[in-house]
Image (cartoon, grey):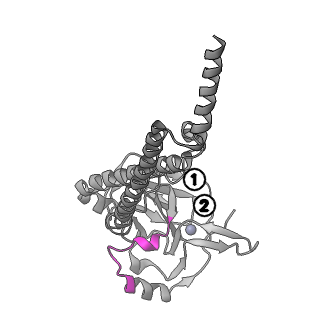
Amino acid sequence: MRRILIWFIAASLVNFVFSYFFYTPKMYFIDRKNREMVMKYEILQARIAAATRKIEEIKHRDQMVYRPLFGQDTLSIAGVYTPYSDSKYAHLTADRVYSPLTVAAWQNVDALGRMIYLESVSMDELQTLSLDKERLAVSVPAVWPIDRTKWNGNISFFGMRSHPILGYARMHNGFDLSAPRGTEVYATANGTVEESQSRGGYGRQILIDHDFGYKTRYAHLSESFVKPGQEVVRGEIIGLVGSTGLSQSPHLHYEVIYRGVHRNPLNYFSLDTKADELDTLLESAHEVILEIDE
Ligand SMILES: [Zn+2]
Protein backbone atom coordinates (compact mmCIF):
# COMPACT_ATOMS: atom_id res chain seq x y z
CA MET A 1 0.00 0.00 0.00
CA ARG A 2 2.73 2.38 1.02
CA ARG A 3 4.73 1.53 -2.08
CA ILE A 4 1.81 2.32 -4.30
CA LEU A 5 1.43 5.67 -2.63
CA ILE A 6 5.14 6.49 -3.10
CA TRP A 7 4.92 5.44 -6.74
CA PHE A 8 1.89 7.58 -7.21
CA ILE A 9 3.56 10.65 -5.66
CA ALA A 10 6.72 10.06 -7.69
CA ALA A 11 4.73 9.72 -10.91
CA SER A 12 2.80 12.92 -10.19
CA LEU A 13 6.02 14.76 -9.46
CA VAL A 14 7.61 13.59 -12.73
CA ASN A 15 4.48 14.53 -14.62
CA PHE A 16 4.46 17.97 -13.01
CA VAL A 17 8.15 18.65 -13.74
CA PHE A 18 7.83 17.29 -17.26
CA SER A 19 4.78 19.36 -18.13
CA TYR A 20 6.46 22.43 -16.69
CA PHE A 21 9.44 22.17 -19.04
CA PHE A 22 7.91 20.25 -21.94
CA TYR A 23 4.58 20.38 -23.72
CA THR A 24 2.40 17.34 -23.63
CA PRO A 25 0.69 16.48 -26.93
CA LYS A 26 -2.56 17.90 -25.58
CA MET A 27 -0.87 21.20 -24.75
CA TYR A 28 0.70 21.33 -28.19
CA PHE A 29 -2.80 20.93 -29.55
CA ILE A 30 -4.22 23.74 -27.35
CA ASP A 31 -1.29 26.01 -28.17
CA ARG A 32 -1.81 25.47 -31.89
CA LYS A 33 -5.53 26.16 -31.50
CA ASN A 34 -4.75 29.40 -29.64
CA ARG A 35 -2.35 30.56 -32.32
CA GLU A 36 -4.98 29.73 -34.94
CA MET A 37 -7.51 31.78 -33.01
CA VAL A 38 -5.16 34.77 -32.85
CA MET A 39 -4.62 34.51 -36.59
CA LYS A 40 -8.34 34.29 -37.26
CA TYR A 41 -8.93 37.36 -35.07
CA GLU A 42 -6.27 39.25 -37.02
CA ILE A 43 -7.94 38.34 -40.32
CA LEU A 44 -11.27 39.38 -38.84
CA GLN A 45 -9.79 42.73 -37.75
CA ALA A 46 -8.47 43.35 -41.27
CA ARG A 47 -11.92 42.58 -42.70
CA ILE A 48 -13.63 44.89 -40.21
CA ALA A 49 -11.15 47.63 -41.17
CA ALA A 50 -11.89 47.09 -44.88
CA ALA A 51 -15.65 47.22 -44.27
CA THR A 52 -15.18 50.39 -42.17
CA ARG A 53 -13.25 52.04 -45.02
CA LYS A 54 -16.07 51.12 -47.42
CA ILE A 55 -18.77 52.58 -45.19
CA GLU A 56 -16.64 55.72 -44.67
CA GLU A 57 -16.56 56.16 -48.46
CA ILE A 58 -20.34 55.78 -48.65
CA LYS A 59 -20.75 58.24 -45.79
CA HIS A 60 -18.50 60.75 -47.54
CA ARG A 61 -20.51 60.50 -50.79
CA ASP A 62 -23.72 60.76 -48.81
CA GLN A 63 -22.59 63.92 -47.02
CA MET A 64 -20.90 65.61 -49.95
CA VAL A 65 -23.26 64.69 -52.78
CA TYR A 66 -26.56 63.03 -51.92
CA ARG A 67 -27.65 65.05 -48.90
CA PRO A 68 -26.71 68.45 -50.41
CA LEU A 69 -28.69 67.48 -53.55
CA PHE A 70 -31.78 67.40 -51.39
CA GLY A 71 -30.81 70.46 -49.36
CA GLN A 72 -30.05 68.33 -46.31
CA ASP A 73 -27.34 69.01 -43.75
CA THR A 74 -25.01 66.31 -42.51
CA LEU A 75 -27.07 63.90 -40.48
CA SER A 76 -26.06 63.57 -36.90
CA ILE A 77 -27.46 61.08 -34.44
CA ALA A 78 -26.59 61.71 -30.79
CA GLY A 79 -23.93 59.34 -29.53
CA VAL A 80 -23.35 57.58 -32.83
CA TYR A 81 -19.59 58.21 -32.65
CA THR A 82 -19.30 57.53 -28.92
CA PRO A 83 -17.86 54.10 -28.12
CA TYR A 84 -19.91 51.92 -25.78
CA SER A 85 -18.77 51.81 -22.16
CA ASP A 86 -16.10 49.30 -21.14
CA SER A 87 -18.65 47.38 -19.08
CA LYS A 88 -20.18 46.09 -22.32
CA TYR A 89 -16.93 44.21 -22.95
CA ALA A 90 -16.35 43.09 -19.33
CA HIS A 91 -17.11 39.46 -20.17
CA LEU A 92 -14.18 39.48 -22.62
CA THR A 93 -11.53 40.83 -20.27
CA ALA A 94 -11.15 37.73 -18.08
CA ASP A 95 -8.40 36.40 -20.31
CA ARG A 96 -5.48 38.79 -19.91
CA VAL A 97 -3.45 37.41 -22.80
CA TYR A 98 -6.08 37.47 -25.53
CA SER A 99 -8.55 40.08 -24.29
CA PRO A 100 -6.84 43.11 -25.95
CA LEU A 101 -7.36 41.37 -29.28
CA THR A 102 -10.92 40.23 -28.73
CA VAL A 103 -12.08 43.47 -27.08
CA ALA A 104 -10.62 45.56 -29.93
CA ALA A 105 -12.39 43.38 -32.50
CA TRP A 106 -15.73 43.70 -30.71
CA GLN A 107 -15.32 47.45 -30.32
CA ASN A 108 -14.55 47.84 -34.02
CA VAL A 109 -17.54 45.73 -35.02
CA ASP A 110 -19.77 47.84 -32.77
CA ALA A 111 -18.38 51.08 -34.26
CA LEU A 112 -19.03 49.68 -37.74
CA GLY A 113 -22.57 48.74 -36.73
CA ARG A 114 -23.26 52.28 -35.52
CA MET A 115 -21.91 53.75 -38.76
CA ILE A 116 -24.12 51.42 -40.83
CA TYR A 117 -27.09 52.46 -38.71
CA LEU A 118 -26.31 56.16 -39.35
CA GLU A 119 -26.07 55.57 -43.09
CA SER A 120 -29.26 53.50 -43.23
CA VAL A 121 -31.17 56.29 -41.45
CA SER A 122 -29.70 58.82 -43.89
CA MET A 123 -30.58 56.69 -46.94
CA ASP A 124 -34.14 56.20 -45.68
CA GLU A 125 -34.45 59.96 -45.29
CA LEU A 126 -33.15 60.60 -48.80
CA GLN A 127 -35.44 57.95 -50.24
CA THR A 128 -38.46 59.68 -48.68
CA LEU A 129 -37.19 63.00 -50.03
CA SER A 130 -36.67 61.65 -53.52
CA LEU A 131 -40.22 60.27 -53.58
CA ASP A 132 -41.37 63.67 -52.36
CA LYS A 133 -39.08 65.75 -54.52
CA GLU A 134 -41.81 68.00 -55.86
CA ARG A 135 -43.13 68.71 -52.40
CA LEU A 136 -39.58 69.42 -51.21
CA ALA A 137 -39.01 71.86 -54.09
CA VAL A 138 -41.93 74.00 -52.96
CA SER A 139 -41.21 73.58 -49.23
CA VAL A 140 -37.71 75.07 -49.12
CA PRO A 141 -37.91 78.85 -48.43
CA ALA A 142 -35.99 79.81 -51.56
CA VAL A 143 -37.23 83.32 -52.49
CA TRP A 144 -37.17 86.85 -51.05
CA PRO A 145 -39.95 87.60 -48.57
CA ILE A 146 -40.70 91.02 -50.11
CA ASP A 147 -40.52 92.52 -53.58
CA ARG A 148 -36.86 93.49 -53.86
CA THR A 149 -37.65 96.76 -55.63
CA LYS A 150 -39.43 97.93 -52.44
CA TRP A 151 -36.30 97.39 -50.35
CA ASN A 152 -34.53 100.70 -49.73
CA GLY A 153 -31.03 99.20 -49.47
CA ASN A 154 -30.80 99.21 -45.68
CA ILE A 155 -30.09 95.83 -44.26
CA SER A 156 -29.13 94.12 -41.01
CA PHE A 157 -27.36 90.83 -41.50
CA PHE A 158 -27.71 87.49 -39.78
CA GLY A 159 -25.05 86.75 -37.17
CA MET A 160 -23.37 88.28 -34.14
CA ARG A 161 -23.75 92.03 -33.86
CA SER A 162 -22.88 94.46 -31.13
CA HIS A 163 -25.50 96.38 -29.25
CA PRO A 164 -25.54 100.02 -30.53
CA ILE A 165 -25.40 101.54 -27.03
CA LEU A 166 -24.25 98.86 -24.61
CA GLY A 167 -21.68 97.43 -27.01
CA TYR A 168 -22.03 93.76 -26.07
CA ALA A 169 -22.34 91.13 -28.81
CA ARG A 170 -25.68 89.52 -29.43
CA MET A 171 -26.91 87.02 -31.99
CA HIS A 172 -29.19 88.36 -34.69
CA ASN A 173 -31.01 85.22 -35.77
CA GLY A 174 -32.67 86.74 -38.79
CA PHE A 175 -32.16 89.14 -41.62
CA ASP A 176 -33.68 92.66 -41.67
CA LEU A 177 -34.86 94.34 -44.83
CA SER A 178 -35.86 97.96 -44.56
CA ALA A 179 -38.96 98.76 -46.64
CA PRO A 180 -41.88 101.21 -46.50
CA ARG A 181 -44.69 100.47 -44.06
CA GLY A 182 -47.40 98.51 -45.88
CA THR A 183 -45.02 96.66 -48.25
CA GLU A 184 -46.46 93.22 -49.00
CA VAL A 185 -44.79 90.26 -47.30
CA TYR A 186 -44.74 86.90 -49.11
CA ALA A 187 -44.63 83.35 -47.84
CA THR A 188 -41.28 82.11 -49.14
CA ALA A 189 -42.43 78.49 -49.52
CA ASN A 190 -45.57 76.38 -49.23
CA GLY A 191 -46.54 75.48 -45.71
CA THR A 192 -48.95 75.78 -42.82
CA VAL A 193 -49.21 78.85 -40.60
CA GLU A 194 -48.12 77.88 -37.09
CA GLU A 195 -48.38 81.28 -35.38
CA SER A 196 -49.95 84.58 -36.26
CA GLN A 197 -49.86 86.75 -33.16
CA SER A 198 -47.80 89.29 -31.24
CA ARG A 199 -44.72 87.82 -29.61
CA GLY A 200 -42.45 89.99 -27.41
CA GLY A 201 -39.84 92.00 -29.28
CA TYR A 202 -40.97 90.54 -32.60
CA GLY A 203 -44.21 92.51 -32.44
CA ARG A 204 -46.83 91.14 -34.83
CA GLN A 205 -45.28 88.06 -36.38
CA ILE A 206 -46.08 85.00 -38.47
CA LEU A 207 -44.38 81.61 -38.18
CA ILE A 208 -44.86 79.13 -41.03
CA ASP A 209 -44.08 75.41 -40.91
CA HIS A 210 -42.93 74.19 -44.34
CA ASP A 211 -42.30 70.47 -43.69
CA PHE A 212 -38.91 68.81 -44.21
CA GLY A 213 -37.66 70.61 -41.09
CA TYR A 214 -38.04 74.18 -42.41
CA LYS A 215 -39.82 77.06 -40.71
CA THR A 216 -39.81 80.77 -41.51
CA ARG A 217 -40.69 83.77 -39.37
CA TYR A 218 -41.79 87.25 -40.48
CA ALA A 219 -41.72 89.90 -37.73
CA HIS A 220 -42.55 93.56 -36.91
CA LEU A 221 -45.56 93.38 -39.25
CA SER A 222 -48.26 96.05 -39.32
CA GLU A 223 -50.83 93.52 -40.57
CA SER A 224 -51.21 89.76 -40.78
CA PHE A 225 -53.68 88.19 -43.20
CA VAL A 226 -53.33 84.58 -42.10
CA LYS A 227 -54.51 82.40 -39.21
CA PRO A 228 -52.84 79.43 -37.48
CA GLY A 229 -53.59 76.19 -39.35
CA GLN A 230 -54.06 78.00 -42.66
CA GLU A 231 -52.18 76.61 -45.64
CA VAL A 232 -50.18 79.05 -47.71
CA VAL A 233 -48.29 78.79 -50.98
CA ARG A 234 -45.02 80.37 -52.02
CA GLY A 235 -45.53 83.99 -53.08
CA GLU A 236 -48.85 84.36 -51.24
CA ILE A 237 -49.26 87.73 -49.48
CA ILE A 238 -49.40 86.94 -45.75
CA GLY A 239 -48.97 90.38 -44.18
CA LEU A 240 -47.59 93.90 -44.44
CA VAL A 241 -44.31 95.44 -43.33
CA GLY A 242 -44.57 97.51 -40.15
CA SER A 243 -42.60 98.52 -37.09
CA THR A 244 -44.31 96.68 -34.25
CA GLY A 245 -42.33 95.24 -31.32
CA LEU A 246 -38.75 96.34 -30.69
CA SER A 247 -38.30 97.97 -34.06
CA GLN A 248 -36.80 101.37 -34.82
CA SER A 249 -38.23 101.88 -38.28
CA PRO A 250 -40.43 99.91 -40.71
CA HIS A 251 -38.64 96.77 -41.79
CA LEU A 252 -39.14 93.03 -42.13
CA HIS A 253 -37.22 90.74 -39.80
CA TYR A 254 -37.09 87.40 -41.60
CA GLU A 255 -35.86 84.08 -40.17
CA VAL A 256 -35.14 80.69 -41.71
CA ILE A 257 -35.15 77.90 -39.15
CA TYR A 258 -34.01 74.43 -40.13
CA ARG A 259 -34.50 71.63 -37.62
CA GLY A 260 -34.73 74.15 -34.81
CA VAL A 261 -31.52 75.99 -35.78
CA HIS A 262 -31.54 79.49 -37.24
CA ARG A 263 -29.89 79.70 -40.66
CA ASN A 264 -28.65 82.64 -42.66
CA PRO A 265 -31.63 83.45 -44.93
CA LEU A 266 -29.21 84.85 -47.53
CA ASN A 267 -28.16 81.30 -48.37
CA TYR A 268 -31.72 80.46 -49.37
CA PHE A 269 -32.55 83.00 -52.06
CA SER A 270 -31.38 80.65 -54.79
CA LEU A 271 -34.65 80.52 -56.75
CA ASP A 272 -34.92 84.20 -57.57
CA THR A 273 -31.35 85.50 -57.13
CA LYS A 274 -28.14 84.17 -58.65
CA ALA A 275 -25.07 84.17 -56.41
CA ASP A 276 -23.25 86.98 -58.29
CA GLU A 277 -26.44 89.04 -58.44
CA LEU A 278 -26.78 88.67 -54.68
CA ASP A 279 -23.15 89.78 -54.19
CA THR A 280 -23.76 92.95 -56.22
CA LEU A 281 -26.93 93.67 -54.27
CA LEU A 282 -25.22 93.22 -50.93
CA GLU A 283 -22.21 95.34 -51.91
CA SER A 284 -24.51 98.30 -52.44
CA ALA A 285 -26.45 97.63 -49.23
CA HIS A 286 -26.01 99.67 -46.06
CA GLU A 287 -25.81 97.77 -42.86
CA VAL A 288 -27.91 99.57 -40.27
CA ILE A 289 -29.49 98.78 -36.93
CA LEU A 290 -33.21 98.45 -37.38
CA GLU A 291 -34.10 96.87 -34.07
CA ILE A 292 -33.69 97.73 -30.40
CA ASP A 293 -32.46 94.72 -28.49
CA GLU A 294 -33.83 94.10 -25.03
ZN1 LIG B 1 -33.95 91.43 -37.20
Point out the image quarter for the N terminus. Answer: top right
Task: Tell me which segment is drawn in magenta.
Answer: 263-277
Q: Check disc 2 and report the residue beneath it.
A: 245
* Image marks 1 and 2: residues in contact by CB distance under 8 Å: yes
| Secondary structure of residue under mark 1 | loop
Residue at 66 percent of width and 68 percent of height: 170
Q: Is residue 168 left or right of residue 136?
A: right
State ligand 1's quadrant: bottom right
Q: Badge 2, how many Cα within 10 Å: few under 14, some, many 20+?
A: many
Residue at 50 percent of width and 46 percent of height: 102
Task: Name which residue type carries label 1.
Answer: Arg
Q: Check disc 1 and report the residue beneath it.
A: 199
Q: Earlier in the sequence, mark 1 or mark 2?
A: 1
Measured Cα–Cα span from mark 1 to mark 2 = 8 Å
Q: Is residue 76 magenta?
A: no
Residue at 51 percent of width and 85 percent of height: 285
Report whether residue 187 is seen: no
Q: Is residue 274 magenta?
A: yes
Q: Badge 1, how many Cα within 10 Å: few under 14, some, many 20+?
A: some
Q: Is mark 1 within 8 Å of ligand 1?
A: no
Q: Is residue 162 above or below residue 221?
A: below
